[in-house]
Structure formats: C-alpha cells, structure tokens
Image: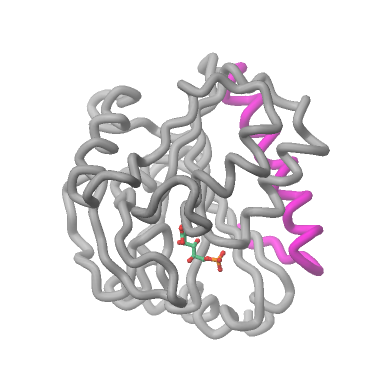
C-alpha cells in the first residue's frame, strides 16, 4: 500500500495514528506491543508527536521498543538514534526503562551485534530466534538502503543482526543492523520517505525490477504482514 501526503507534517500525523491503532490492536490481541524504530531525520516528527500530542494514547508499560539499526557512537552523540529519540519521545512518556531495548552502541560493533541478537532472542516467537514485531518503522536512503542494509551488502544472510561499516552522508560509519530475516517477520512494516532527493530511487524501488543487492530496501517484503509506504509528494513525484 502506498499513501502520499502533502508534506512531512501530514505524513507524520497519519503515521502517529497508524502507530496508535496498531499498538491498541496488538495489546488487545497479544497483551503487548513490540515496535522496532528507525533512525534518521524522517521519523523524528512522528516521535515528537507521540511524545506530545499523543502521549496519553497508548498504554506504554505494555510497549517494548527495539531498533532496526543503530550507529555505534555514545548515547549522548547527536548521531545516536536512541539518544535523539529519548529526548523527544521516551523522556515524555511513562514507559519503564527496561522496555526500551537499545543497541549497546558503546561496544565494538561485532559485540554489539551479538548482544542485540541475544536481546531479540529473549522476545523470540518459536520457531524464530527473534520476535515478530507488531510494527517495524523503516526509512530509505537516497542510495536505496534501509536500516543499515546498504547497497553491496550480502543479500543472503541467516543471522538476525549484522555489524556493518558504511559511508552515508557523513553519518557515523560503524553500525549494527537488523537483517531482513527479522524485519520480514514483522506483522506491519511502515516506510516513511520524504524529499525530492529520494524520488528517483523510490521509483526504481517500486518498479518491477528486483535488484536486492543494489537496492536493499527491496529486500523488505513481510512474509505474513502488511507493507505500507508513506511518502510526501516530492518523494513520490515520479510514481
Ligand atoms: C539510520 C536509519 C537509516 C535511515 C535512512 C534515511 O539510522 O540512519 O535507520 O536507514 O532511515 O538513512 O535517513 P533520513 O530519514 O535522515 O533521510
């Protein structure tokens, strides 16, 4: 499903309402809501809304947050996704710290990736070694990466997490990412994509040409879940 919005504000409002709807349904059906968050600039407006306008809309003690990827820098570094999200979202809601499952970005990337695979295992849904997220939020780089699955990275991997090094727009290079194995187990995947710089890549990604090595975002296809693209008119201008 593809939905286009005038701008990031309208898109973020819709994303917030979708988040809340999926959270409430998951809590009704399974007693908890497992959500994987995305880094980058695009979801920040959504996190601000959830920490402000919608802060009383969800039973936060029944929510567990995970990350689709993280940059291996200290939490107080502006490049750390957990740290940035904590300021605008987690610090504004009543959620137990133990419900926020951050990547230990202060560790060596390989150790942080192994540690995070164990964190995921603690929420695993057999026969999987990881949880089925009720919602995975993802973004897309103008190079076609998502989470920290970058062009040229190995397509066929068995693991839940990977330590990667990637150069993208001068952002921290060392990262830990979930693989498509985990993300494709999600019940709902919500992509948030904005800006003209992503229009060409988005039109290639949503074309019939399947190029998973070159366009890792195409590796995301939930086996038994919904895939929803939220974009602004600029990003979707070539569709
Ligand atoms: C990250 C993200 C990454 C992001 C894209 C798009 O931590 O960097 O997980 O995959 O979603 O790079 O970033 P923007 O939203 O800033 O364009």
Q: Which residue is drawn at 72% across and 46% down?
A: 48
State whether residue 61 is above or below residue 115: above
Q: Which quadrant of the figure contains the C terminus?
A: bottom right
Q: Is residue 226 visible?
A: no
Residue 11, x across and y down, in percent: 74, 58
State whether residue 198 is above or below residue 64: below
State whether residue 72 is above or below residue 213: above
Of the pair 122 and 21, the residue shown nearer to us: 122
Of the pair 157 and 61, the residue shown nearer to us: 61
Q: Quadrant of residue 20?
A: top right
On screen, residue 183 versus residue 163, left or right, reads right
Q: In which quarter of the image is residue 86?
A: top right
> For the magenta stretch, what is the residue range?
1-28
Q: Residue at x 63, y 84 (%)?
A: 238
Colour convention:
one colour
Q: Which quadrant of the figure contains the N terminus?
A: bottom right
Magenta-colored stretch includes residue 184: no
Q: Quadrant of residue 31?
A: top right
Q: Residue at x 57, y 78 (%)?
A: 198
Number of callouts: 0
Magenta span: helix, strand or loop, mainly?
helix
State whether residue 183 is above or below residue 168: above
Residue 108, x across and y down, in percent: 22, 49
Residue 200, x across and y down, in percent: 54, 85
Q: Residue at x 34, y 53 (%)?
A: 72
């Amino acid at each position: 499903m593809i939905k286009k919005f005038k701008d990031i504000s309208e898109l973020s409002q819709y994303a917030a309402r979708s988040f809340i709807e999926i959270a409430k349904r998951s809590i009704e059906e399974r007693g908890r809501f497992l959500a994987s968050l995305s880094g980058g600039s695009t979801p920040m407006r959504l996190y601000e809304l959830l920490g402000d306008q919608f802060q009383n809309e969800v039973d936060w003690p029944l929510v567990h947050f995970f990350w689709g990827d993280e940059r291996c820098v200290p939490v107080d570094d502006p490049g750390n996704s957990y740290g940035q999200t904590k300021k605008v979202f987690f610090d504004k809601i009543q959620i137990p710290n133990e419900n926020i499952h951050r990547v230990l970005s202060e560790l060596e990337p390989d150790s942080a990736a192994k540690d995070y695979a164990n964190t995921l295992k603690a929420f695993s849904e057999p026969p999987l070694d990881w949880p089925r997220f009720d919602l995975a939020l993802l973004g897309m780089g103008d190079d076609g990466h998502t989470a920290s699955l970058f062009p040229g990275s190995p397509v066929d991997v068995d693991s839940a997490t990977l330590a990667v090094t990637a150069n993208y727009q001068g952002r921290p290079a060392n990262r830990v990412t979930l693989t498509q194995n985990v993300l494709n187990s999600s019940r709902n995947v919500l992509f948030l994509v904005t800006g003209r710089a992503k229009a060409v890549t988005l039109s290639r990604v949503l074309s019939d040409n399947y190029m998973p090595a070159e366009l890792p975002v195409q590796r995301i296809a939930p086996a038994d879940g919904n895939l929803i693209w939220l974009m602004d008119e600029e990003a979707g201008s070539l569709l």
